[in-house]
């Protein structure tokens, strides 16, 4: 039996791992984005000291490797009496870590928006939250689409670190299959291929957002031409 | 108009405001009756824009009161509690504003700019909002641009969208903050024409402007502000032909 | 945390530091080579490079290091774990650096090249004396940014048995039964290293902007 056949016979292990990766990544990316939207709103509209503290935390997260943060949550917290199982620690790590990155991206993008439009929104009777949801946030997403897309791909790759804290996702599955059945190339090639496909999909989505942005004159390419 | 409505659409009572230690407004008073068009004139830095922005509480005065149709804005009736975001938003929904830099929302098309606030602030049904928006855009003369995005429009077109957007909220008064100052000269006329039509229909307007001919022909009253104080308050012909103060004369000499 | 534990931790930090440094030292020039090859528009090579960069940016480091460490011997290439780790980090960072260099090359003002050609310079000379000194400056912020990502991803090498700054915390807590202190110290060390690089990046950014004027 050739190695590819062996792999095919045990495909449920790999596919099961892939499904776990997708769930981890999908849920975390969306939750992180939502959390980050709130963080940025809090930073921009909250009281100054609070905003500074939040910014400090965000900056701190961005100087930490993801794995050591996951270690902190999974191996470190039990010393303080807080015990998470691997999956929960994984989700919390992914969501809070990437929320910090998304928040920094959104905050930086907001700083480039002209202040007039927020004023116009308030002058027309929008509450702060409504203004953020309908006027500011859509523009932040359109303008920062490529950078946000990059960050989403990083989130996908970070799920692989969770194999080190015993989460059974795609890399853990590929590793298990290859060591059991001696098919390292085949198993890892498929795993890498699946990561690659997923990130292509993300880039395709980002490209579509880019088209929408171009159409409205918000793309970075058009910025130089805008009147 | 019911007889119990208050006499003034906008009342500004003894409003003062400082920025970084510099007094920009000093005990300014202003009353705008319903249906009136008041033009606020004055040299740069005189505090005209700040006054306008205090009326819809985009700037918060240090002291004084501002009433919109008899109701205080920014601070509750007790004089002490600041209005929360939601109440303030509700009051602002009754005041329209047109900005010097247009401030259109770039991610929305022209018609979406005009329907956005009616739908999401007033809770208007989408079809109704679109129908009204189309009429307003026709009225200001850019009906055919309804699906365009702001970035393709000229300054004059953008400003007319801004006017339609303010009108779409059916405001009781519209504030104009130097609406033509950012426009190339040949585009100024189309915007002033739209504003003139509004004044003739009886819209209550407070206009900060440098367009003297417009102020003279369209206003019911001229308020001249210099260094934060109201220096003169007169009917247009009286102000332009027979200014009573030296500062007004000095100001007008630049425009004749 | 006692002396012995601290000493072990610092050894782990050193491991991370030297492996990262070697990977960067190789990955920066490799990235430049890839970018230049791509701009040279050689038919097949160009496509291969695009594929490599795309794969390199999409593959998690954990998966890649396992793949290389386990797979290389089967191809007849004996690889000890340190070499495997360096090769993995190098290949990964080169893919990202290729894009940084490419952006700098693309945005390089063509007029300068024309002037140099008019003065009789060969392509190699133009690149060496005119282009490289300048794209080096404009690329630095992006390259330093990528270095911070390299350090943040480096804990992946623990999975093939290298006792780096992250994995060393497992070692220490296996002896002391107190996992939190070494993790916190390791986290602090990472933050100091990355924080320094971020500050450096901002300085370089300002310098690059001035050049662009």
Image: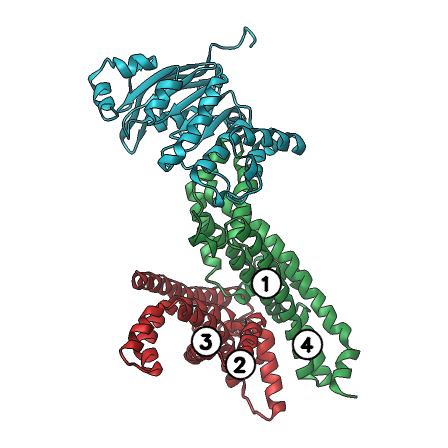
Instruction: Give the spatial CA distance, label 3 vs label 4.
Output: 31 Å
The residue tagged 4 is A190
The local secondary structure at tag 4 comes to helix
- Label for residue C39? 3
Instruction: Determine the residue located farthest toward the top in the rendered image.
Output: B3
Q: Chain of mark 2?
A: C
Q: Which chain is cyan?
A: B
Mark 1 residue crowding within 10 angstroms, few (<14) / some (14–19) / many (20+): some
Marks 3 and 4 on same chain = no
* Marks 1/4: CA–CA distance: 20 Å
- For the C terminus of chain C, the quadrant is bottom left
Q: Residues within 10 Å of mark 2 (few under 14, many from 20)?
A: few
Disc 1: which residue: A203
At horizontal 35% and vertical 83% (from top left) the residue drawn is C124
Q: State left or right for residue C24 relative to residue B240.
A: right
Q: Which chain is red?
A: C
Q: Secondary structure at mark 1?
A: helix
Chain A drawn colour: green
Q: Is residue A41 left or right of residue C110?
A: right
Gap between marks 2 and 3 measured at Cα: 11 Å
Mark 1 or mark 4: whose residue is earlier in sequence: 4
- Which percent across, then down, holds residue C11? 44, 77
Q: Chain of mark 3?
A: C
In this rendering, is residue C197 above or below B209?
Answer: below
Q: Are marks 1 and 2 in contact (CB under 8 Å)?
A: no
The residue carrying mark 2 is C43
Q: Are marks 1 and 2 on the same chain?
A: no
Secondary element at tag 2: helix
- Name the quadrant containing residue C70: bottom right
| Label 4 vs label 2, nearer the camera | 2
Mark 4 vs mark 2, CA separation in Å: 27 Å
Above or below, B46 against A25 in this view is above
């Amino acid at each position: 039996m050739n190695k590819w056949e062996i792999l095919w016979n045990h495909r449920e292990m790999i596919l099961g791992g892939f499904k776990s990766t997708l769930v981890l990544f999908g849920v975390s990316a969306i939750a992180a984005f939502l959390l980050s939207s709130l963080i940025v709103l809090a930073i921009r509209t909250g009281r100054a000291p609070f905003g500074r503290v939040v910014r400090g935390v965000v900056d701190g997260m961005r100087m930490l490797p993801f794995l050591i943060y996951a270690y902190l949550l999974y191996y470190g917290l039990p010393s303080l009496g807080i015990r998470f199982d691997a999956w929960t620690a994984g989700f919390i790590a992914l969501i809070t870590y990437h929320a910090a990155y998304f928040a920094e991206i959104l905050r930086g993008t907001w700083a480039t928006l002209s202040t007039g439009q927020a004023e116009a929104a308030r002058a027309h009777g929008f509450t702060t939250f409504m203004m953020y949801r309908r006027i500011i946030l859509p523009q932040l997403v359109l303008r920062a689409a490529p950078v946000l897309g990059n960050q989403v791909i990083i989130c996908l790759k970070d799920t692989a670190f969770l194999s080190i804290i015993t989460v059974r996702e795609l890399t853990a599955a590929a590793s298990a299959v290859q060591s059991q059945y001696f098919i390292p190339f085949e198993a890892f090639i498929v795993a890498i291929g699946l990561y690659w496909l997923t990130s292509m999909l993300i880039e395709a989505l980002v490209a579509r957002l880019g088209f929408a942005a171009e159409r409205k004159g918000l793309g970075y390419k058009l910025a130089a031409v805008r009147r | 108009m019911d007889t119990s409505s208050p006499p003034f659409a906008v009342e500004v009572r003894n409003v003062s405001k400082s920025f970084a230690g510099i007094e920009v407004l000093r005990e300014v008073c202003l009353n705008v009756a319903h249906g009136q068009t008041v033009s606020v004139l004055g040299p740069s830095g005189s505090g005209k824009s700040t006054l306008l922005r205090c009326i819809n509480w985009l700037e918060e005065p240090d002291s004084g009161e501002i009433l919109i149709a008899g109701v205080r804005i920014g601070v509750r009736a007790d004089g002490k509690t600041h209005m929360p975001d939601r109440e303030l938003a509700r009051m602002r929904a009754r005041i329209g504003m047109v900005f010097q830099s247009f401030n259109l929302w770039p991610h929305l098309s022209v018609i979406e700019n005009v329907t956005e606030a009616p739908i999401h602030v007033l809770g208007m049904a989408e079809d109704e909002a679109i129908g009204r928006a189309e009429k307003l855009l026709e009225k200001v003369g850019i009906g055919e641009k309804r699906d365009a995005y702001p970035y393709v429009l000229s300054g004059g077109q953008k400003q007319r969208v801004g006017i339609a957007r303010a009108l779409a909220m059916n405001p009781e008064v519209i504030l104009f903050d130097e609406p033509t100052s950012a426009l190339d000269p040949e585009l100024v006329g189309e915007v002033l024409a739209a504003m003139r039509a509004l004044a003739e229909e009886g819209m209550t307007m407070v206009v900060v402007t440098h367009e003297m001919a417009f102020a003279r022909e369209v206003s019911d009253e001229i308020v001249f502000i210099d260094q934060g104080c109201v220096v003169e308050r007169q009917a247009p012909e009286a102000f332009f032909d027979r200014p009573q103060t030296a500062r007004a004369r000095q100001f007008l000499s630049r425009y004749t | 945390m006692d002396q012995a534990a601290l000493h072990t931790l610092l050894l782990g930090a050193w491991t991370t530091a030297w492996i990262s440094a070697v990977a960067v030292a190789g990955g920066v020039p490799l990235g430049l080579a890839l970018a230049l090859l791509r701009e040279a528009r050689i038919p097949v090579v160009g496509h291969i490079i695009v594929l490599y960069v795309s794969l390199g940016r999409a593959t998690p480091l954990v998966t890649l290091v396992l793949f290389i460490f386990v797979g290389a011997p089967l191809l007849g290439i004996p690889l000890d774990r340190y070499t495997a780790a360096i090769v993995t980090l190098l290949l990964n960072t080169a893919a990202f650096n290729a894009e940084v260099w490419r952006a700098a090359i693309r945005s390089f003002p063509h007029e300068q090249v024309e002037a140099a050609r008019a003065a009789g310079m060969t392509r190699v000379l133009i690149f060496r004396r005119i282009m490289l000194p300048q794209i080096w400056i404009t690329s630095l912020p992006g390259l330093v940014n990528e270095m911070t990502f390299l350090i943040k991803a480096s804990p992946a090498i623990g999975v093939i048995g290298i006792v780096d700054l992250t994995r060393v915390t497992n070692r220490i807590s296996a002896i002391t039964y107190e996992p939190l202190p070494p993790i916190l110290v390791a986290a602090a060390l990472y933050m100091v290293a990355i924080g320094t690089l971020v500050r450096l990046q901002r300085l370089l950014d300002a310098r690059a902007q001035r050049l662009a004027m």
